[in-house]
Image (cartoon, rainbow, N blue to C red):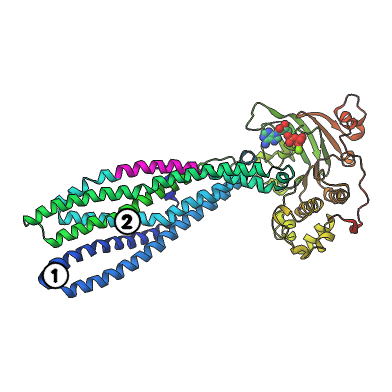
C-alpha cells in the first residue's frame, strides 16, 4: 500500500493534467450511464407511446460526441501522466544508482541494475500508463451504473449487490498472488539479464575456454524458470474473466426472477426493467477490465517495490553539511594513521596504521605483492571509500571535511583497465573537461603519443571507438586515458598499474606519455617497472596492508631483510628500460 502511495506521489507534479483527465473520465462514465436512461426512454416513450423521438435522437447525438471526446481526452491525458511519472522514476533511479558508493557497485552486477532500470520500469510503465486510466474510468462507469440501478430499483439493485463479495474476494486474493509471482518473475528476469551481460561482455573468455555450451545451458535454465513463472502469472490472470462471467450470470438470473415478479405486479415498467437489465449486463465489461487492471497494478506494485528498495538504499559518499571547497593544492598529501576495512568484512583490516606524506610535486611509488592493499590505499584519496580509522589530509585538511566535487576536481586517475566510452576520440579525451577547445585536446593527445594513431584513423578525432574502446589496441586505449588525464590537468595524479597490461613496445610509448603526465604533479604510482619505482621520490612498501618501509630506492634496496629488498630480489620489478619513443611508424595498432 505504501508503495502505491509513493507511486501516486510521483504524479503530484502533474495534478493539473490528472484533474483534467478525471473530468474527462467522469464525463465518459456519465455518458455511459446516460445511454441506459435513453434505452429506458425509447422503450417506455418512443416505442410504447410514440412520443419523444426527437429528444432521443438529439440526446444520442450529443452523448456520442461527449463520449467520444472524453474517451480520447482521458486516454491521452492518463497516458501522458503515466509516462511522465515513469520518466521521472527512471531518471531518479539512474541518478541515484550512479551516486552510490564503490561498495554498492561491487555487490551488484551491472546486469542486475540494468534489469531494474529497464524491466521493472517497463512493468510499471505498462500498468501506469495503460491501465490506470482504465482503472479510474471503469470504476467511475461502474459507479454510474450502480447509481442508476439504485435510482431505478433499489430492491433489485440490492439483489445484485449480494453477489459483490463473490467478485471482490477472489479478486483481492488473486491480486495478492499475482503480485508475489510477478516479484519472482522480475527477480528471475534480473538473473537472466545478469547471465547474458556477463556472457556477452566476457565473450572472448567464454569462447577461449570452450564454455559456450555451459553458458547456454545456464541461460536455458534461467529462461525456463522465468517461463514457468510467467505462465503461473498468466494462469492467475486468465482465471479472472471466467470467474466474473459466472458471478455475473448468477446476478442476471436473480434480476430476471425478481424483476419479472415485480413487472407482473405492476411495480416496474418494461423500460425500467430493460434499463436495469442492460446495466447489469453492461457491468460485465467494466468489471472484467477492472480485474485485468487490478492484475496489472499488482504487477506494477511488485516492480515498484524493487525500484523503491534501491531508491531507499543510501550508500553515497556525501559532503558534510556546509563543507567548504578544497583550495588548490599547495603543500602536499598526508596519510595519517589510516586504517581501512571493507564494509562486508568490518573486522578484516585491509590497511592498518598507514602513515606517510608526500610533498607537492613529488612522486610516491606504492609497492607490494598483489593483494597487499595498494589499490585500496589510493582509492581513499578520491574518497571512493572513506578511511575507517585515521585520516587522509590534503594541505592539512581532512578530505572528508571538504566537498567531494572540489576534491575530485584536483585528481586525475589512470587505471590498469582503461574505461572509455562509446563516443568519438575527441569526446573521450575531453571527458574530464567537456568544453576544452580542440587545440587543447590535440595538445594532450600529442603529449600522450596518441596524435599519430588518431590521425591515421578514418575519421581522426571524430572516430567512434566502440563500447569500452574495443576498436583500439590496449596501448592505444591507455594513451587515450593518459591524454584524458593530461587534459584534466589536475595537481594530483593516481596511476594504478597504468602500464602493466601492455606489451613492451606500446609500453615504451605509454611510459613516455606517463613521464610527461607526471611532470609537476603529485603522483601516486603503483607500478611494476623498476625505472618508475627507482625514480620515485618516495617508495612506500606495503606488506599485508601495513606500511613496512618508507624511503628511496637507494635507501631501501640494500636493507638486509627489508621488504623492498625482498621484492627486488623476487624480481617483482620489470627491469626493461623503455625503448626510445618517438618513432611513430613503429606504433602498435
Ligand atoms: N571491494 C572489495 N571488497 C572486499 N575486499 C576487497 C575489495 N577490494 C579488494 N579487497 C581485498 O583487499 C585486499 C587488497 O586488495 P587491493 O587493494 O586491490 O590489493 P593490491 O592493489 O595491492 O593488489 C585483497 O585481499 C582483496 O581481497
Ligand atoms: Mg591493485
Q: Residue at x 16, y 57 (%)?
A: 152
Q: Position of residue 383 (x, y in %)?
A: 68, 41
| Whole-percent x, y for residue 232 in the image | 44, 43
Question: In what element is the residue under mark 1?
Answer: helix
User: In terms of depth relative to the viewer, which is nearer, 570 or 367?
Assistant: 570
Helix, strand or loop for disc 2: helix
Farthest-out residue, bottom: 54
Q: Which residue is depicted at the point 72% across and 43% down?
A: 210
- Residue 172 lies in the magenta-colored region: yes
Range shown magenta = 168-188
Query: Residue 433's quadrant in the figure?
Result: bottom right
| The disc label shown at residue 74, or none | none
Residues 588 and 209: in front is 209
Whether residue 550 is visible here, answered yes or no, is: yes
* Residue 109 visible to the viewer: no
Separation of residues labelled 2 and 1 (CA atoms): 31 Å
Disc 1 designates what residue?
A: 47
Total count of labels: 2
In this rendering, is residue 20 above or below 497? below
- As displayed, is residue 359 above or below residue 95? above
Residue 19 occupies which quadrant of the picture?
A: bottom left
**Pointer 2 residue:** 138
Q: Magenta residues: mostly which secondary structure? A: helix
* Residue depicted at x 54% and y 47%: 116
Q: Residue 463, how many percent across, how many down?
A: 74, 62
Assign ligand 1 to one image quadrant: top right
Residue at image coords 32%, 49%: 242
Q: How many residues crowd mark 1 within 10 Å: few (<14), some (14–19), many (20+)? A: few
Sequence-wise, which precedes: disc 2 or disc 1? Answer: 1
450 relative position to 124: left or right: right
Amino acid at each position: 500500500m505504501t508503495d502505491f502511495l509513493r507511486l501516486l506521489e510521483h504524479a503530484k507534479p502533474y495534478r493539473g493534467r490528472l484533474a483534467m483527465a478525471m473530468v474527462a473520465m467522469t464525463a465518459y462514465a456519465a455518458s455511459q450511464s446516460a445511454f441506459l436512461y435513453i434505452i429506458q426512454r425509447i422503450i417506455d416513450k418512443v416505442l410504447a407511446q410514440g412520443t419523444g423521438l426527437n429528444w432521443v435522437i438529439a440526446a444520442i447525438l450529443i452523448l456520442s460526441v461527449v463520449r467520444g471526446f472524453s474517451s480520447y481526452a482521458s486516454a491521452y491525458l492518463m497516458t501522458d501522466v503515466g509516462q511522465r511519472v515513469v520518466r521521472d522514476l527512471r531518471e531518479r533511479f539512474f541518478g541515484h544508482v550512479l551516486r552510490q558508493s564503490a561498495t554498492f557497485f561491487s555487490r551488484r552486477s551491472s546486469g542486475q541494475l540494468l534489469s531494474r532500470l529497464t524491466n521493472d520500469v517497463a512493468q510499471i510503465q505498462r500498468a501506469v500508463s495503460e491501465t490506470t486510466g482504465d482503472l479510474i474510468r471503469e470504476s467511475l462507469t461502474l459507479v454510474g451504473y450502480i447509481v442508476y440501478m439504485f435510482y431505478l430499483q433499489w430492491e433489485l439493485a440490492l439483489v445484485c449487490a449480494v453477489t459483490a463479495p463473490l467478485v471482490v474476494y477472489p479478486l483481492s486474493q488473486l491480486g495478492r498472488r499475482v503480485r508475489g509471482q510477478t516479484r519472482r518473475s522480475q527477480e528471475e528476469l534480473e538473473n537472466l539479464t545478469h547471465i547474458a551481460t556477463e556472457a556477452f561482455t566476457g565473450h572472448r573468455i567464454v569462447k577461449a575456454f570452450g564454455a559456450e555450451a555451459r553458458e547456454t545451458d545456464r541461460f536455458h535454465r534461467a529462461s525456463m524458470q522465468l517461463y514457468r513463472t510467467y505462465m503461473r502469472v498468466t494462469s492467475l490472470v486468465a482465471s479472472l474473466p471466467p470467474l466474473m462471467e459466472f458471478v455475473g450470470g448468477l446476478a442476471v438470473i436473480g434480476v430476471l426472477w425478481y424483476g419479472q415478479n415485480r413487472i407482473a405486479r405492476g411495480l416496474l415498467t418494461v423500460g425500467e426493467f430493460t434499463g436495469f437489465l442492460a446495466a447489469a449486463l453492461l457491468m460485465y465489461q467494466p468489471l472484467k477490465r477492472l480485474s485485468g487492471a487490478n492484475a496489472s497494478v499488482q504487477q506494477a506494485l511488485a516492480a515498484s517495490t524493487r525500484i523503491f528498495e534501491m531508491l531507499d538504499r543510501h550508500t553515497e559518499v556525501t559532503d558534510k553539511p556546509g563543507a567548504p571547497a578544497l583550495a588548490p593544492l599547495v603543500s602536499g598529501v598526508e596519510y595519517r594513521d589510516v586504517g581501512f576495512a571493507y564494509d562486508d568484512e568490518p573486522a578484516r583490516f585491509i590497511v592498518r596504521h598507514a602513515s606517510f606524506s608526500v610533498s607537492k610535486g613529488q612522486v610516491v611509488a606504492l609497492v607490494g605483492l598483489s593483494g597487499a592493499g595498494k589499490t585500496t590505499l589510493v582509492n581513499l584519496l578520491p574518497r571512493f571509500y572513506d578511511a575507517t580509522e585515521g585520516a587522509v589530509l590534503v594541505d592539512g585538511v581532512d578530505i572528508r571535511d571538504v566537498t567531494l566535487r572540489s576534491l575530485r576536481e584536483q585528481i586525475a586517475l589512470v587505471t590498469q583497465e582503461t574505461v572509455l566510452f562509446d563516443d568519438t576520440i575527441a569526446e573521450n579525451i575531453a571527458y574530464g573537461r567537456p568544453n576544452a577547445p580542440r587545440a587543447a585536446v590535440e595538445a594532450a593527445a600529442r603529449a600522450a603519443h596518441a596524435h599519430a594513431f588518431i590521425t591515421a584513423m578514418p575519421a581522426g578525432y571524430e572516430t567512434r571507438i566502440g563500447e569500452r574502446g574495443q576498436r583500439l589496441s590496449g596501448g592505444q586505449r591507455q594513451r587515450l586515458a593518459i591524454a584524458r588525464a593530461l587534459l584534466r590537468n589536475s595537481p594530483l595524479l593516481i596511476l594504478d598499474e597504468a602500464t602493466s597490461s601492455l606489451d613492451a613496445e606500446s609500453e615504451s610509448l605509454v611510459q613516455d606519455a606517463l613521464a610527461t603526465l607526471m611532470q609537476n604533479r603529485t603522483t601516486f604510482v603503483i607500478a611494476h617497472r623498476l625505472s618508475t619505482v627507482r625514480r620515485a621520490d618516495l617508495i612506500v612498501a606495503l606488506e599485508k596492508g601495513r606500511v613496512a618501509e618508507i624511503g628511496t630506492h637507494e635507501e631501501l634496496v640494500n636493507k638486509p631483510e627489508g621488504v623492498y629488498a625482498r621484492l627486488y630480489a623476487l624480481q617483482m620489478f620489470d627491469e626493461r628500460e623503455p625503448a626510445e619513443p618517438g618513432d611513430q611508424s613503429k606504433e602498435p595498432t
